[in-house]
Structure formats: C-alpha cells, structure tokens
Image (cartoon, rainbow, N blue to C red):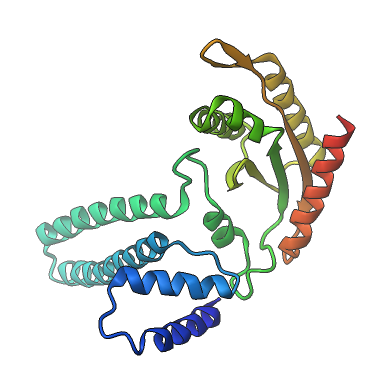
Amino acid sequence: MHNVHRTITDVTKQAIASIPIVFPVEYGKIYADIAKQHNMELRVEDIFAKEMLDEKMIRHIVLICELSDQALVAMNDNNMQRLQEVIVETQKLRDEIYALQKMVYEDPLTKSYNRKWFDDTYLADHDHLHLRGEGILVLIDLNRFKEINDTYGHLVGDKVLAHVALKLKESGGRVVRYGGDEFLLIFDNSQALAEIEIKMERMLDYWKKISFKSEKYNFKITFSYGAVIFTNDSKVEDIISEADKAMYQQKRSR
C-alpha cells in the first residue's frame, strides 16, 4: 500500500508541475482522481482528515517521549511534586489518545468498529491479505434493506442500522460495520461454531418478534448470516468468500 501511495504521489507531482498555484483542496482532488485510476477510492475530505490525525498522533508520540524523560529525571531527583505533575499530564494525554483512537476506529452511525479497525486488528501487517489469530467470523447482511430506505427514507434506515448494531453487541462478539448494511461479528476461539450459530438463531427469533414503526406503518427486518472458522494466516479473501457463500445459501433456504 505504501508503494501505491508513492506512485500516486509521483504522478500527482507531475500533474501539478505546470500549475502556478496549487491550493490544498485542488491537490487533494487531483490526488483522489489519480488514486481512483489505481483502484483506490479516496474522498478529498478523507485525505486531509487522515493527515490531521497523523499529525496529532505524531505530536502525541513526541509528547509521550518527553513526559517519559521528565518522569525519569523527577524520579532520579526524588522530585515527587514534578513526578505527580507528569502523571497528571500523562493521564490527560492518554484521554486524548483514546479520543483519537475512537475517531479512527468507530463507525459514527452505528458506534461499532469500522473496516479500518478490522484491517488494523486482524490483518497481518506484512501484506494485509492474511488474517492473524484464531476465531470465528460471522458475516451478516440485512435482507431487503434497500426497500426500507426507499420506502421509509434514509433516516429510518439509519435508525435500523444503529439498532441492529446495538443488538449484535449483546452476542459478546466484536461488531464491525463492514460496509452499507453488512456487519461482521468476530469471536475468539473460546467458543465452538455450533454455539455461535445458536446465538445467531436466537437473534433471528428476536427480530421476528419485534417491529419497527415509521409514522403509521410497521415493518419487520430480518438478516442472513454465514459463520466460518478462521485460523492464523488464513487468507482473508477466502474466509470472507466462504462466509458469503454460507450466508447466501442460508438466505435461499429460508
């Protein structure tokens, strides 16, 4: 991925070489357009949001190093007052880092993890093609969700997604909004596949019993799922594909 961005940067530099003045937004648009040619979908606002987050993280890392040095000096000098001040500053910094981490890894609509969190947590650093760790992955797709959006509006659809994510969290798995109306549930290897499938069936029973209300109309939602076991170094594409096949097989059978 780093090499791809380097290539895009080089092409962008060539594209703006003859332009007398390049404003940041223009650079971002050109960069995003060239990225699209390399099969990378980027929005201009995402580019600058990421740059600002990266800058903040770098500042925090530098500050952590400085505070660590100050703490060591305070301990060597037996300066308990200064050490206490450093501890207070470190706690404030920790809270800021947690807030930044939330911005980076949380889906703002459903308050579940986003796809970046999944990639950073479960994909191997060396290639982002293989999974690390062991567990069970459940792919979940809401049935006929487009009809809900088209019939009742996107605000209602958003509320449905938020409620679904909230309910999925009760399963004990880590909830990831994978894209649109698709979610992932990630469980560690302490539970058997059969146990997870029982949980999912109970959840389906729950959705059968409740209804959503939009003005004078009531409607129900259902979902399909595919659960698969993954092991360390499993190819992520294969695992998602296997879960996808299991999900659609279940959807057809119902």
The vertical placement of 137 against 164, above or below, is below
Q: Position of residue 233 (x, y in %)?
A: 73, 67
Extreme residue in the top direction: 216
Q: Where is residue 234 in the image (x, y as percent from the top left)?
A: 75, 63
* Res 233 seen here: yes
The vertical placement of 177 against 208, above or below, is below
Image position of 114 (left or right of 210): left
| 180 vs 89, nearest the viewer | 180
Residue in the picture at 78% in, 55% down: 241
Q: Position of residue 47 (x, y in %)?
A: 40, 66
Image position of 61 (left or right of 30): left
Residue in the picture at 47% in, 52% down: 105
- Based on the displayed image, in which of its 4 quarters is residue 118 positioned? bottom right
Residue in the picture at 64% in, 35% down: 146
| 247 vs 189, nearest the viewer | 247
| 118 vs 84, nearest the viewer | 118
Extreme residue in the right direction: 253
Q: How many labels does the image show?
A: 0
Residue in the picture at 64% in, 74% down: 127
Quadrant where the C terminus sits is top right
The vertical placement of 71 against 81, above or below, is below
